[in-house]
Image: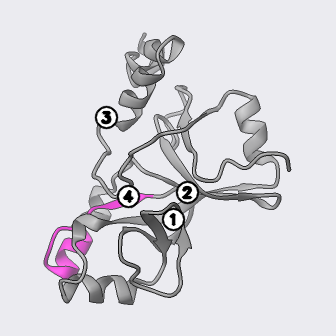
Amino acid sequence: MNYSYKGKILISTPDISGDIFSRSVVLIVEHNEEGAFGLILNKKNDNMSSKLLELFGFQVAVYDGGPVENDKTFFICKGQKVSEEYLKIDDEFYLTEDIENVVSFILEHQMSVNDMKVFSGYSGWSAQQLEGEILRKMWTPVDVYNLDYTSPNDQFLWKNIMQNLGGEYLLWANAPEDVSMN
């Protein structure tokens, strides 16, 4: 493997499939010769969010991390480490599955709900699969700086990044969600 997309953002190419990856913004958390692991940053799951509101008594947005293992919960956290079991994303953010410590830190006011983002499931690629999809123009890898991964950036994130890329991406950004209606 010559290049890792770890830490990059993938922007999905518009298509008519209408699946979970349509207009998705994916953070690649890990990428090596065995494959890639990422989380969709902009697909809020209102049903799961409502269930957590009932469970915890306070609002917690849940995002669809991807179509793989939707029974697994992942947290991107900002700042202070809440667990010894984490994967560093960058100097400010990390990933953990330690639900007990995350909830404990929030209930004890050691961490704000705004300093974490909850994901159900993840996006996964086998060896060389992601590279093949990028070559087939299904994804555009982007270096995005100063993006707060814990922000509720579901509504316009894809469109904003596409607009910032300019050129043909600007056309895609302004296309209707159902491109067959264009």
**Mark 1 is on which residue type?**
Gly
- Tell me if I can see residue 72 in this picture: no
Q: Which mark is residue 102?
A: none
How far apart, in angstroms, are the residues tagged by discs 2 and 1?
6 Å
Left or right, residue 123 beside residue 100: right
**Mark 4 is on which residue type?**
Tyr
Q: Tell me the residue at 20%/81% (across/down).
A: 56
Return the disc, 3 or 4, that comes first in the chain's sequence: 4
Q: Name the residue that disc number 3 marks.
A: 156
**Magenta part of the protein: which range?**
51-64
Left or right, residue 52 beside residue 67: left
Q: Tell me the residue at 78%/38% (across/down).
A: 132
Q: Which mark is residue 63?
A: 4
Left or right, residue 154 beside residue 57: right
Task: Tell me the mark number nearer the camera, choosing from 4 and 2.
Answer: 4
Q: Position of residue 108 (x, y in %)?
A: 19, 89
Q: Residues within 10 Å of mark 2 (few under 14, many from 20)?
A: some
**Mark 2 is on which residue type?**
Pro
Q: Are marks 2 and 1 in contact (CB under 8 Å)?
A: yes
Q: Name the residue that disc number 2 marks.
A: 67
Which quadrant holds residue 155? Answer: top left
How far apart, in angstroms, are the residues tagged by discs 3 and 4?
15 Å
Q: Which mark is residue 121?
A: 1
Q: Nearer the viewer, residue 149 or 17?
A: 149
| Picture layout, residue 34 above or below residue 21 | below
How far apart, in angstroms, are the residues tagged by discs 4 and 2?
11 Å
> Mark 4 falls on what kind of element?
strand
| Picture layout, residue 146 above or below residue 94 | above
- Tell me if I can see residue 132 in this picture: yes
**Mark 3 is on which residue type?**
Phe
